[in-house]
Image (cartoon, grey):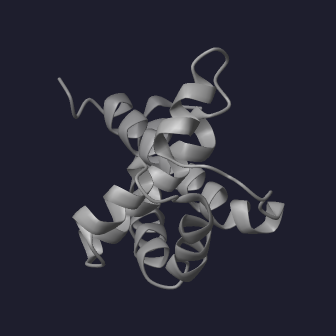
Amino acid sequence: MTEEFLAGLAAIIGAACMLIGVLLMFLMVTLFFRKTEEVERRIATPGKQLDGIRSIWGNGPIGRWMRVSHVYAFFVFRKFPRIGARIESRMGDEEEPLPRSLKLWVIVPYTAFVILTFLFFFSGWYLGAFD
């Protein structure tokens, strides 16, 4: 493989990651947000951080994105050893176990978005955009 071919491949991957990432973000704050609200309703107990985030950020596009990010952070950070229980108790409570399919509506799209963002910046780095 030549350097020219790899540079072209990196440019195509970067552009595709950007387009798919923006589309995925749009879907998360529109179509997928109903599931995020359902998860948030079940885990955001009154007086906890997720309940406050809902009232602070509201229901606009940026507010929805912040709410999706915080629900995702709740699921990811609570699995950390030693500090996970404190983070979970501060952010919210999963009083009744949520169905795995409901959790995946938040975890899978956001994780895909993070991976696409990483690939976008990595392809930019490979192409020398940060020099």
**What residue sits 54% from the left and 56% below the top?**
110
Which of 129 and 36 lies nearest the eye of the viewer? Answer: 36
Q: Position of residue 82 (x, y in %)?
A: 63, 14
Residue 55, image x, y percentages: 29, 67
Residue extending farthest top: 82
Q: Residue at x 52, y 85 (%)?
A: 31
- State left or right for residue 101 relative to residue 66: right
Asked if one can make out residue 71 in the rendered structure from this viewpoint, the answer is yes
Report x, y in % for residue 27: 48, 77
Instruction: In the rendered view, tell whether residue 4 sits above or below residue 67.
Output: above
Left or right of 92 in this view: 107? right
> Can see residue 4?
no
Q: Is residue 88 left or right of residue 60?
A: right
| Relative to 61, 106 lies left or right | right
**In percent of the image, x 62 and y 45: which residue is there?**
75
Vertical comparison of 121 with 130: above or below? below
Q: Residue at x 26, y 29 (%)?
A: 128
Q: Quadrant of the N terminus?
A: top right
